[in-house]
Image: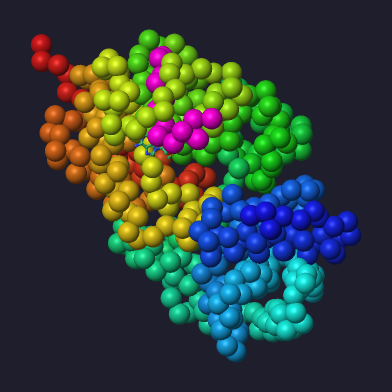
Amino acid sequence: MGARTRKAPRTGADAGSEVRRRASAAVSAVLHEGWRLEAALDYEGLGQADRALLRELATGTVRWAVRLRAVLDDLLDRSLPRKEKRLEALLLVGLHQLSHTGIPPYAAVSATVGALTGKQAWARRLVNGVLRRFGRERDDRLARVDNRSPALRHAYPDWLVEALGAGYPENWEAVLAAGNRPPPLTLRVRGDRSAYLEGLAAAGIPGSALDAAPGAVALEEFLPVGALPGFAEGRVSVQDGAAQLAAALVAPRPGERVLDACSAPGGKLAHLLDWAPGAEVVAVEAEAGRLARIRETLDRLGLEAGALVHGDATAPAAWWDGRPFDRILVDAPCSGTGVIRRHPDIKHLRRPEDIPALAARQGALLEALWPLLRPGGRLVYATCSVLPAENREVVTAFLEGEPGARTATPEADWGRPDGPGRQILPGEQGMDGFYYACLEAPEAAA
Ligand SMILES: C[S@@+](CC[C@H](N)C(=O)[O-])C[C@H]1O[C@@H](n2cnc3c(N)ncnc32)[C@H](O)[C@@H]1O
């Protein structure tokens, strides 16, 4: 990525072009090289306003790339040479600005053309011509693409539209649309939520309470964590409202032994520790590099887990001491299709063949961890997926092989019943798409 880094120039016009250049580098890294967007964004040397603009341009372009690529194909007389990947990305950044932002067209075009430092005149002419033409014919060009298919209209890959159509025959299009709406920045407030909201209001930061999650506050605008009141002191964490429902479902009590089986970066672990300070919580994470993320989370909040284990939760023989757990949280690795509004790169990074492979891992986690539960103990299965193949189908298949297990998912004022659990769809009550299922082990025979 080093080649993409360059210090931001001083003048406003140059800075605007530098932001477009970096946005196109990040978009290209996602679309052509399979990078995660967050890892591809290079903020170095940019001021706060330019950082925000870079984030918006790159995220928005990645969000709408399927639609914008179809628009671009229509606008080009002949395809771009295959090696011109960055040029394609820059054109998409330009089209995004003209389609989905309030940036004045002349400013969008000139800053985008200005990003072509060192490029030949033909490339400048091409970008200038394509963007100006699109600016003149915008509504017609978009309508032509949108009428071709829901996948193009909502900018999703075909396979995902089909999977969501099969899962939600009545409201699949609403699910697609919700995944394109920029999400709120949601916080988990530790302590008095009303007092925190008052502090936000005093600081001029608009925020509101989320009904479904008692500690959740949604901010309308994205802010870097350093600008969040009380963040450094551990008064708040960034955590979606749906993710904040986990602790109440696990509901650990002081003195109980709890397993958080897929723990990094530790958001739900921290909530469990806040919920029951006297519980002994063992956190397991398979990726060694991500253990540091858990430590960072806990250190900032002044919390400590009972144990932090680098291990594979599907192979507990390597790390389990044989003492049963009262509660287990399985926050399984998943497709992330419920959080596409936060991570639009998921549209491009996931492949249809990932889903059965993930479902197999999710089933393996349930099977490996169930024997670690004490009689009468509770296991909570969670994903941030909206695909039934990773949710109700995984849990239903597990229950078929474990007839003693009892479904104990509570009635709730969030989500909808879905097989043995409840499904939240993206955007509902301000939350991400999530699935939760609670299972209880049979009591020991007297
Ligand atoms: C959805 S994330 C968990 C999010 C976390 N619970 C939180 O709230 O911050 C899933 C995590 O499970 C980890 N993981 C995947 N397979 C695993 C396995 N077999 N054993 C343990 N951890 C695993 C991934 O590396 C990833 O960090």
Colour scheme used in the picture? rainbow
Q: In this view, does 197 lie to the left or right of 330?
A: right
Residue 192 placed where, x, y %? 60, 22
- Residue at 60%, 62% in the rendered image: 27
* Quadrant placement of the N terminus: bottom right
| 295 versus 19 height, above or below | above
Up-down relation of residue 46 to residue 205 (above or below): below
218 magenta-colored: no
Q: Can residue 143 be seen in this view?
A: no
Residue visible at 33% across and 32% down in the picture: 313
Image-based side of 440 in relation to 144, left or right: left
> In screen coordinates, is 384 left or right of 15?
left
Q: In which quarter of the image is ligand 1?
A: top left
Q: In this view, does 246 lie above or below 154?
A: above
Is residue 379 something that shows in the picture?
A: yes
Residue 445 placed where, x, y %? 10, 15
In the rendered image, residue 211, in percent from the top left (x then y), is placed at: 51, 36
In which quarter of the view is residue 195 placed?
top right
The magenta span reads: 279-292
Decide which of 79, 419 is in the foreground and name it: 79
Q: Which residue is drawn at 17% across and 19% down?
A: 443
Is 281 in the magenta? Answer: yes
Q: Which residue lies furthest to the left in this view?
A: 446
**Percent x, y for residue 309?**
41, 24
Q: Identify the image quadrant of residue 119.
A: bottom right
Q: Which residue is drawn at 59% across and 81% down?
A: 80
User: 288 or 260: nearer the eye?
Assistant: 288
